[in-house]
DNA sequence: GCCGGCTATTTTGCATTCATTTTTTGTCCC
DNA sequence: GGGACAAAAAATGAATGCAAAATAGCCGGC
């Protein structure tokens, strides 16, 4: 029994479903490699916000023709990293303050979800590993090592997402994280001493809820933690005089 | 100061950032229209799972060349609706039971987030509107009108997402909803009498928490509600003898 | 000297064409 | 008659070509 497409009657060949399960097989084709390279390049923030990027230049730089490049650009646009203005090319997407607030909230929701799910399936070993990271992070905190702190912090949050055992969630999380990472000041969130101490306390609460597998509670704590992060980030955005220079 | 791309030194022209804010300007271009049409077509489930979709046929059917079509396919693949096997064309993505579970959980997380955010900003008028929908839905429930019930139900959930005032969340929600909608049996979830009654009670609780703007509580209730939906759906999948015929 | 309209160049969007890979089919041999 | 191999056919991946739109440059006018 074949489906047909309306107005045409073109038959769709219903082939037997094979259980191939691969999330990204992009490495093979050219447009796939281009996609990976371009995405990394944009995420790393190498292109200034709103910068116009002529296709021709990118083609020369990557040594390919415009066809696969344009395919990659369409995907990046779908991911929200760039925007394509009709007949006017691709621009690195400009994130308004509102956009950032929204992104942070969505990240908060996803991590909140991750925590809830993690409580259902996380092993003692995984909790121990997270505790390990926590103590490591605490050490960095005591030594005022922002970079180390930030890295440990990120690994903790990643571990929680991993413990949720949900690849769909994981990739959505990665997508949004990428959009935010473009905005560099991440490393500057915790500049303010007070916020830093607060964050440590919140992390204690996170760990505590996780140990007790208190899903609903962990969900709350994580959300609030990310919410506070958001507030700090936005504050930092609106009065950046304290942080590092905006553009080198 | 211009950025340059590594290994080439090609300058990126840093144009002044204009605050253009449009989420989807796809309607204009051809590939954009193709994208919308194809997406709808796939989401509506017109193409059997895992069916191979020859580019040539689609081109003839849509009356375009392969270039814009392929661009649209890349985007659909990025959205998770189809998968592109290297050198072997596009297939409608096959969702395993695990995939569905994951999707449902992510949806649950997003709605849970939506509820929490909604409590921060929702107006009395919006709550009244949702109450209206709720009573309408209750009527459909009493009359055993599954279709009407399902529609009202969907509008309630949409209203909550809208009330969250977060476009990023809204579009992510729409994306995942599309992936799930492909799987048809949605309309059959509530077949079982008991589940149906349960769902109504849960909706009462949702409305109650919303009225009190109890964000954290609403978040919990919504998550549990969606979780139960998920369980019902999966059960329905594994023993579909009760429902409607699988393919007309 | 500055602004507005007109033309030339660039750039985007799509179609077409070329090269490879896959799939099909026909044939031969067992 | 069935399976394996090989060649043909078709499909995909990428490059090129062409039309339309946008940008930039130029000139004239105020």
Image (tube, coloured by chain):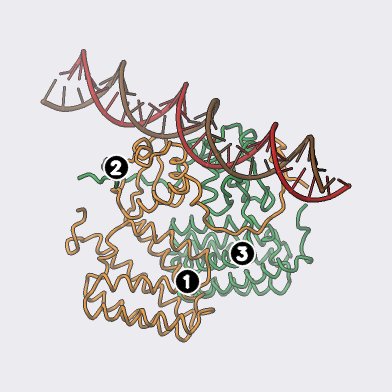
Chain colours: A orange, B green, C brown, D red
Q: How many marks?
A: 3
Q: Is residue A181 left or right of residue A29?
A: left
Q: Are marks 2 and 3 on the same chain?
A: yes
Q: Which chain's residue wears label 1?
A: A
Circles 2, 3 touching at the beta carbon (< 8 Å): no
Q: Nearer the viewer, residue C29 or A16?
A: C29
Name the element at disc 1.
Answer: helix
Above/below status of B176 relative to B14: below
Relative to the observer, which residue lies in front, B170 or A130? A130
Calculate the distance from the C-alpha at mark 2 to the C-alpha at mark 1. Answer: 38 Å
Q: Is residue A7 visible?
A: no
At numbered mark 2, what does the secondary structure look like: helix, strand or loop?
loop
Could you tell me which residue is drawn at 41 percent across and 75 percent down?
A222
Do the residues at pointers 2 and 1 share their chain?
no
Determine the CA span between mark 2 and mark 3: 45 Å
Q: Which mark is residue A162?
A: 1
Q: Chain of mark 2?
A: B
Q: Is residue B137 above or below residue D21?
A: below
Labels 3, 1: front one: 1
Q: Position of residue B158 (x, y in %)?
A: 54, 59
Tags 3 and 1 touching, CB below 8 Å: no
Q: Are marks 3 and 1 on the same chain?
A: no
Instruction: Say what secondary structure mark 3 lies in.
Output: helix
- Position of the N terminus of chain B by quadrant: top left
Query: In the rendered image, is residue B62 in sight?
Result: yes
Residue B8 badge: 2
User: For mark 3, what is the residue?
Assistant: B100
The image's mark for residue A100 is none
Tag nearer the camera, 2 or 1: 2
């Amino acid at each position: 029994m074949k489906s047909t497409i309306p107005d045409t009657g073109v038959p769709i060949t219903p082939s037997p479903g094979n259980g191939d399960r691969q999330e990204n097989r992009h490495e093979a084709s050219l447009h796939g490699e281009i996609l990976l390279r371009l995405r990394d390049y944009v995420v790393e923030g190498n292109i200034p916000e709103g910068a116009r990027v002529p296709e021709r230049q990118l083609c020369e730089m990557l040594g390919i023709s415009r066809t696969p490049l344009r395919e990659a650009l369409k995907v990046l646009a779908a991911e929200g990293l760039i925007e394509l203005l009709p007949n006017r090319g691709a621009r690195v997407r400009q994130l308004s303050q509102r956009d950032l607030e929204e992104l942070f909230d969505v990240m908060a929701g996803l991590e909140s979800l991750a925590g809830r799910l993690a409580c259902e399936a996380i092993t003692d070993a995984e909790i121990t590993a997270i505790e390990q990271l926590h103590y490591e992070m605490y050490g960095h905190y005591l030594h005022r090592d922002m970079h180390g702190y930030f890295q440990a912090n990120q690994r903790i949050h990643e571990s929680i997402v991993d413990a949720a055992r949900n690849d769909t969630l994981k990739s959505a999380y990665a997508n949004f994280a990428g959009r935010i990472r473009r905005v560099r000041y991440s490393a500057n969130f915790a500049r303010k001493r007070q916020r830093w101490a607060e964050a440590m306390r919140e992390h204690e609460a996170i760990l505590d809820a996780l140990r007790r597998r208190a899903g609903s509670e962990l969900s709350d704590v994580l959300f609030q933690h990310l919410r506070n992060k958001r507030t700090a980030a936005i504050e930092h955005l609106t009065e950046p005089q304290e942080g590092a220079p905006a553009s080198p």
